[in-house]
Amino acid sequence: MKDFIIAPSILAADFAKLGKEVEDVLSAGADMIHFDVMDNQFVPNLTMGPMVCESLIKHGIEAPIDVHLMVRPVDALIKMFAKAGATYITFHPEASENIKMSLDLVRDLDCKTGLVLNPQTTFETIEPVLEELDMLVLMSVNPGFGGQSFIDSTYEKIAQARTLIEHKGLDIRLEVDGGITENNISRVAECGADTFVAGSAIFSKPNYETIIDEFRDKLVSSKD
Ligand code: DX5
Ligand code: ZN
């Protein structure tokens, strides 16, 4: 099992002061920045493009950036986000014409690969390419919006994913995205996740350090 990573989703940040928000959440103890890209076609919302990613890096952000593409098709944006400095580039299997080729593209551009499964998407779709992944992401809400409630059936899916990863002896991260709060993060970890995306649960709080510390405490005690 890998070290725990807390990845705030900046979808819930104040975009009018994004650089400061990212600096603040990192100095409060976050490990990685989760960057949600929506195209108003694959999902019914429109967010940020590669220029925003590049601006954050030019602003001095050195933490890894976890780009979650909710766009179709994916290949052109994979290239743009790799150029913009993304660390991870993850996408949904439904959004690629050829999943293996899109994963190869991410890796050839020196980024880490990841596939994202919607709540209804099963493992069968991606089993043939599991070996190609640096990270498997399970959506615990339907993609498109922040601030939704965690879908309870995800707990079992996380446990199944952990079993699959161990069974195949893969050295990959297991990220869970959507509806994570101080009330469910322990259980998400107990089921086998090691990477936790949280948007509204962090950015809605007046003090980011307090909530990230609380997450960290819950993660430590979930190991007992
Ligand atoms: C949903 C996004 C999530 C979301 C998480 O489409 O992929 O990353 O922003 O936000 P919360 O934690 O508010 O559910
Ligand atoms: Zn996301």
Image: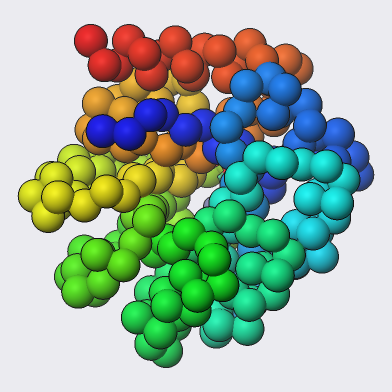
- Looking at the image, residue 147 sits to the left or right of residue 113; the answer is right
- Looking at the image, residue 34 sits to the left or right of residue 125; the answer is right
Quarter the N terminus occupies: top left
Q: In percent of the image, x 64 and y 63: which residue is there?
A: 37
Residue 112 coordinates in the image, percent (x, y): 48, 59
Q: In percent of the image, x 70 and y 70: which residue is there?
A: 83
Up-down relation of residue 19 to residue 168 (above or below)? above
Residue in the foreground of this view, choosing between 129 and 218: 129
Q: Kindly indicate the quadrant of the structure image that contains residue 153.
A: top left
Up-down relation of residue 53 to residue 156 (above or below)? below
Up-down relation of residue 81 to residue 11 (above or below)? below
- The residue most toward the left is 167
Residue in the foreground of this view, choosing between 126 and 100: 100
Residue 49 coordinates in the image, percent (x, y): 75, 67
Is residue 145 visible to the viewer in this orientation of the structure? no
- The residue most toward the right is 16
Q: In percent of the image, x 33 and y 34: which residue is there?
A: 2
Residue 143 coordinates in the image, percent (x, y): 50, 58
Q: In percent of the image, x 56 and y 72: which residue is there?
A: 109
Is residue 123 visible to the viewer in this orientation of the structure? yes
- Looking at the image, residue 40 sits to the left or right of residue 89; the answer is right
